[in-house]
Image (spheres, rainbow, N blue to C red):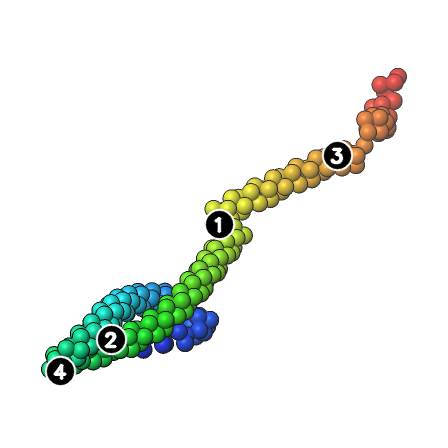
Amino acid sequence: MGMIGRLKRILKAVVADIVEKARDPELELARFVEEVEMSLGEVRTEAEEVRLRRDRLARLAAENQVAAEEWMAKAESAAGRDEDDVAREALRRHHEAHDEMESCRERMNQAEEALRTLQEDETALRRKLAEAREERKRLTARLRRAESEKHAGAALADADRPSEAADRVREEILDMQSEGEATRQVHAESIEAQFAQIDAGPSLEEELTALKERVKKRPDAEDTKQ
């Protein structure tokens, strides 16, 4: 695509539409910025060439104006001396210089108009480039923020998710707690059973009384007393 076609397409482009319609907005914006920068360089180069051509035409117009005036003066001088052939040639040269002067001025005006158009295009391209760069900066910031939030979310999820080592340690602690609780329970039951047996059994006094009763009832108890 030539410079003119690309320039028209760029100036008609809407940066927001590029971002909205692109599958990869960041890549498309980068390409668009590259195209704008390229077109801007071409417009500047073309503007410089037109400026040089305008200045050259201005010099030629001025030179031909001076030549036309000089030839007119020679024609008048020759006509005053009745040198018709010389006057006739001077007049011909005068018209050539005058026509060339007018042509240079016309082309100079065309160059001036082209230069104004190129300057307007350059201004428009500068605005378009600034807009695209700003949108690219905002897009990059949004993508980085989204990526950071994604990483942060993943980190939080990993933090909330127990690791295998932590699971093993937690299970060992629970097992130890369960074993300790079972041991304490068995020990407590044993002690309670012992106390229960003690409470349930006769006291020494009761046992002694019962023993005396049994002794008194023996047949040989009366003999012993005698």
Q: Position of residue 123 (x, y in %)?
A: 40, 67
Q: Which residue is mark 1?
A: 163
Contact? badges 3 and 2 (CB < 8 Å): no
Contact? badges 3 and 1 (CB < 8 Å): no
Q: CA distance from mark 4 to mark 1?
A: 116 Å
Q: Position of residue 164 (x, y in %)?
A: 47, 49
Name the front one of labels 3 and 2: 2
Q: Which mark is residue 101?
A: 2
Q: What is the crowding at mark 2: few (fewer than 14 residues within 10 Å), some, or many (at least 20)?
A: many
Q: Which mark is residue 84?
A: 4
Name the front one of labels 3 and 1: 1
Quadrant in which the C terminus appears: top right
Kindly give the residue lying farthest to the front in the view shown: 81
Q: Which residue is mark 3?
A: 195
Nearer-N-terminus badge (1/2): 2
Q: Amino acid at mark 4?
A: Asp
Q: Secondary structure at mark 3?
A: helix
Residue drawn 73% across the image and 37% down it:
192
> In the figure, 64 relative to 173: above or below?
below
Q: CA distance from mark 1 to mark 2?
A: 91 Å
Nearer-N-terminus badge (4/1): 4
Q: What is the crowding at mark 4: few (fewer than 14 residues within 10 Å), some, or many (at least 20)?
A: few
Report if residue 31 is visible in the image: no
Q: Amino acid at mark 1?
A: Ser
> In the figure, 89 relative to 25: above or below?
below
Contact? badges 4 and 3 (CB < 8 Å): no
